[in-house]
Image (cartoon, rainbow, N blue to C red):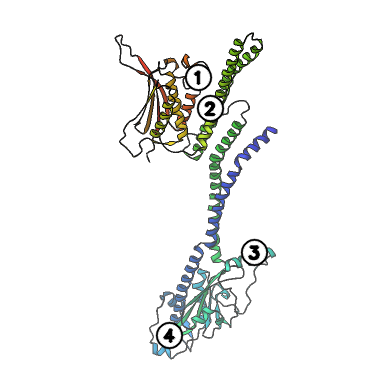
């Protein structure tokens, strides 16, 4: 049970994570808003009403013309021939002359009109009412038998089934929502036909239509068409839809829309969960891996590899992997640096401790003086080591915090060479600077960086070359353009670099100074710091030997060492 509960919680956390819920909610909300707009604001309802109005007008004109055109004069009454009525077209008039017809009065006989009205109205399920010229109801299709017999027109409208409180409240709410700007339909008495605006207008000779809504929210479309004979209005034919027939069509359409919505909802939720899984799952794995890296109790955790994804998740995974790799490298460097510092500090401390312990045992002044010299030397060595270590430890932070600027390497080299030349005693060594002419730009040797740190690089290289150059020798410093880079070379005339040591000279605390300088006078951090500064400027530094022409034995002698620094030039 415990295992099942864990699996259930895991699946629940995966399927209903915060990101998954947000994606599903946004997609479903947009779909619901779209469907709601279709159900409530679509043009189908208005188009259906307009089409129904046109249909009723056309139907009413045909029936009105048929009633008027099929009548015959019989003791001042209109006689309708059903067969003749069905054969006539809309607007067709009888062949009698207008003068003879205008002199006659044509009252409408409901007994003769009822059968034909029943035959024309029954298939359409439309309610038809005929009013005379005074607006009095003559005939209502609601009170016709199937054969056209007329019921009592003053009979009350049959009551519908009794509705409960909830149904009545729902009908009122639906009526209030759907009513909008539409007037409310009220059933008027048979003697008050003129109370309908469309009937009043049709009595004036013009067809009219109006759309109303019942208190139950059902739409009723009514049209009134004048029944005319010889340009005289005999009465009005009023056609109206049954309450609820338009709603039935709308209900069917909305039901279809809801079915489509249900399918789209299921598809949207499935796609949302799948999409969230492709986002939330990898994000969760990356977050868990980052937490494990942060804790890092036992082993170094590996960030999941999503490099095959060409999206933001893949980019984030690659960035986290690179960041973690850089972090591990920095940790390794810190550990190695701490070990090297401990080792380098241990040697002078051991020597200092031995000299201090031996000093009380010295038997003469010469021995005590020699021990004091050792103590002073070790103290100076410790001071130099601590200063260089402090400088090396602050270097990354200073380069990261400091604002880079445009630096002219030719000007920096000129200043460094001038300072270093002043440190040479008795002119025993020369430092020569060569600036090659450049063909591009007003500042061909400009780079983006920190002038003080770049000056420190060249000071270390020139100081290193001075220590290996013989008396009377020359240190050659040159700057030139090498493609997109500015190249600075420092050459000495010393013994060169042993092939087995070329890969070690940039290591921390490594030193291979001439014996004339004495032991412990250099910390071994100068070249390491120089490499660190150059790489922080996106540059490279390398060391190599300079060779002369081959001698008689085919051997090229070593003329000295050469250090080459390349830093990308500023092309602005």
The residue where tag 3 is placed is: 170
Residue 239 in sight: yes
Of circles 4 and 2, the one toward us is: 2
The reply to whether callout 3 and callout 1 are in contact (CB within 8 Å) is no
The residue where tag 1 is placed is: 510
Pointer 3 or 1: first along the chain: 3
Residue 339 in sight: no
Residue 155 placement (x, y as % from top left): 63, 78
Residue 244 placement (x, y as % from top left): 57, 66
Q: Taking 227 as reference, is 176 above or below it?
A: above
Q: CA distance from mark 3 to mark 1?
A: 92 Å
The residue nearer to you, when weighing 7 against 170, is 7
The residue where tag 2 is placed is: 329
Q: Taking 73 as reference, is 301 above or below it?
A: above
Q: CA distance from mark 4 to mark 1?
A: 123 Å
Of circles 2 and 3, the one toward us is: 2
Q: Quadrant of residue 191?
A: bottom right
Of circles 4 and 1, the one toward us is: 1
The residue nearer to you, when weighing 354 against 425, is 425
Q: CA distance from mark 2 to mark 1?
A: 20 Å
Residue 102 placement (x, y as % from top left): 42, 89
Residue 378 placement (x, y as % from top left): 58, 18
- Give left or right: position of 379 versus 81: right
The residue where tag 4 is placed is: 231
User: Which quadrant does the N terminus fall into?
Assistant: top right
Q: CA distance from mark 3 to mark 4?
A: 48 Å
Pointer 4 or 2: first along the chain: 4
Residue at left offset 42%, top offset 28% = 540
Pointer 2 or 1: first along the chain: 2
Q: Quadrant of residue 462?
A: top left
């Amino acid at each position: 049970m415990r295992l099942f509960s864990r699996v259930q919680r895991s699946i629940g956390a995966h399927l209903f994570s915060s990101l998954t819920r947000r994606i599903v909610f946004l997609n479903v909300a947009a779909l619901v808003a779209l469907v709601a707009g279709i159900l409530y604001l679509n043009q189908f309802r208005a188009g259906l009403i307009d089409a129904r109005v046109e249909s009723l007008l056309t139907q009413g004109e045909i029936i009105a013309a048929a009633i008027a055109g099929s009548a015959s004069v019989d003791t001042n009454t209109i006689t309708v021939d059903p067969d003749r009525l069905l054969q006539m077209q809309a607007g067709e008039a009888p062949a009698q002359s207008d003068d003879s017809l205008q002199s006659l009065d044509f009252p409408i006989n409901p007994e003769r009109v009822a059968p034909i009205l029943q035959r024309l109205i029954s298939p359409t399920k439309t309610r038809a009412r005929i009013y005379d010229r005074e607006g009095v109801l003559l005939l209502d299709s609601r009170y016709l038998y199937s054969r056209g017999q007329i019921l009592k027109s003053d009979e009350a409208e049959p009551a519908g089934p009794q509705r409960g409180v909830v149904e009545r409240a729902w009908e009122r709410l639906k009526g209030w929502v759907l009513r909008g700007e539409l007037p409310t339909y009220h059933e008027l008495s048979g003697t008050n036909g003129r109370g309908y605006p469309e009937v009043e207008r049709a009595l004036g000779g013009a067809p009219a239509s109006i759309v109303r809504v019942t208190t139950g929210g059902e739409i009723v479309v009514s049209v009134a068409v004048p029944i005319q004979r010889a340009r005289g209005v005999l009465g009005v034919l009023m056609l109206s839809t049954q309450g609820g027939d338009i709603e039935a069509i709308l209900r069917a359409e909305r039901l279809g829309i809801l079915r489509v919505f249900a399918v789209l909802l299921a598809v949207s939720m499935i796609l949302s969960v799948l999409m969230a899984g492709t986002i939330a799952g990898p994000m969760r794995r990356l977050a868990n891996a980052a937490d494990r890296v942060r804790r890092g109790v036992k082993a170094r955790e590996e960030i999941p590899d999503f490099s095959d994804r060409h999206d933001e998740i893949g980019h984030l995974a690659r960035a986290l992997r690179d960041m973690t790799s850089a972090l591990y490298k920095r940790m390794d460097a810190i550990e190695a640096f701490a070990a090297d510092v401990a080792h380098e500090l241990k040697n002078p401390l051991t020597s200092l401790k031995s000299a201090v312990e031996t000093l009380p045992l010295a038997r003469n002044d010469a021995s005590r003086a020699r021990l004091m010299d050792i103590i002073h030397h070790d103290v100076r060595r410790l001071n130099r080591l601590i200063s260089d270590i402090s400088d090396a430890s602050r270097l990354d932070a200073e380069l990261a915090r400091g604002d880079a600027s445009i630096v002219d390497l030719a000007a920096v080299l000129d200043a460094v060479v001038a300072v270093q030349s002043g440190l040479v005693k008795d002119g025993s060594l020369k430092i020569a600077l060569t600036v090659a002419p450049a063909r591009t730009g007003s500042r061909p040797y400009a780079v983006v960086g920190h002038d003080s740190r770049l000056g420190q690089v060249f000071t270390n290289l020139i100081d290193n070359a001075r220590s290996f150059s013989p008396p009377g020798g020359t240190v050659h410093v040159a700057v030139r353009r090498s493609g997109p880079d500015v190249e600075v070379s420092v050459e000495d005339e010393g013994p060169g670099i042993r092939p087995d040591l070329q890969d070690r000279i940039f290591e921390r605390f490594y030193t291979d100074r001439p014996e004339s300088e004495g032991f412990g006078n250099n910390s071994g951090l100068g070249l390491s710091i120089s490499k660190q500064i150059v790489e922080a400027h996106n540059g490279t530094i390398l060391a190599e030997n300079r060779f002369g022409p081959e001698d008689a034995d085919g051997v090229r002698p070593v003329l000295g060492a050469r250090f080459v620094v390349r830093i990308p030039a500023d092309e602005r």
